Amino acid sequence: MTQMTPPPPAPTPNGSDPEPPFLSLHTAVVLLTALVIGLIAGGLTLLAGLSVAGAVLAGLTSAGSSVPVLHSLIGRSR
């Protein structure tokens, strides 16, 4: 039985290696989750009756403080 091998990758137009992504998957997941947490906290604060400025401040604070925690909780792929 013969085994098929995949074709070699096509060379890039300028002959260099492909450019790495701007953000890693880990960073994108952490920042997106922090954004969702900030939106939820800000929305709940607004619904609780505080002013819009107070809700924005609460959302920014919760999003900013959740980034280091999420960074340590969401492990990098190996």
Image: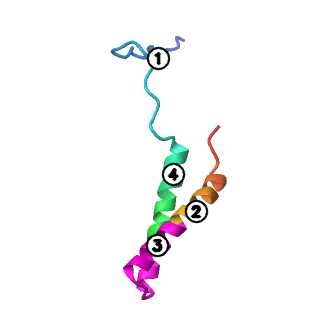
Residue 55 in the image: x percent, y percent? 43, 77
Viewer-proximal residue, 73 or 64?
64
Q: Residues within 10 Å of mark 4 (few under 14, many from 20)?
A: some
Q: Residues within 10 Å of mark 1 (few under 14, many from 20)?
A: few
> Is disc 2 placed on a helix, strand or loop?
helix
Can you identify the residue that label 3 sits on?
57
Residue 53 in the image: x percent, y percent? 40, 77
- Discs 1/2, front: 2
- Marks 1 and 2, Cα distance to the nearest angstrom? 43 Å
Assess whether residue 61 is covered by the magenta stretch.
yes
Can you identify the residue that label 1 sits on?
6
- Discs 2/4, front: 2
State whether residue 15 is above or below residue 57.
Answer: above
Q: Residues within 10 Å of mark 3 (few under 14, many from 20)?
A: some
Horizontally, is 25 left or right of 72 in the view? left
Main SS of the magenta part reads: helix
Disc on the earlier residue, 2 or 4: 4
Marking on residue 66:
2
User: Magenta stretch?
Assistant: 40-62
Q: Tell me, yes or no, if residue 53 can be seen here.
A: yes
Can you identify the residue that label 4 sits on?
29
Viewer-proximal residue, 15 or 3?
15
> Is disc 3 placed on a helix, strand or loop?
helix
Disc on the earlier residue, 1 or 3: 1
Q: Tell me, yes or no, if residue 43 can be seen here.
A: no
Q: Amino acid at mark 1?
A: Pro
Horizontally, is 25 left or right of 78 in the view? left
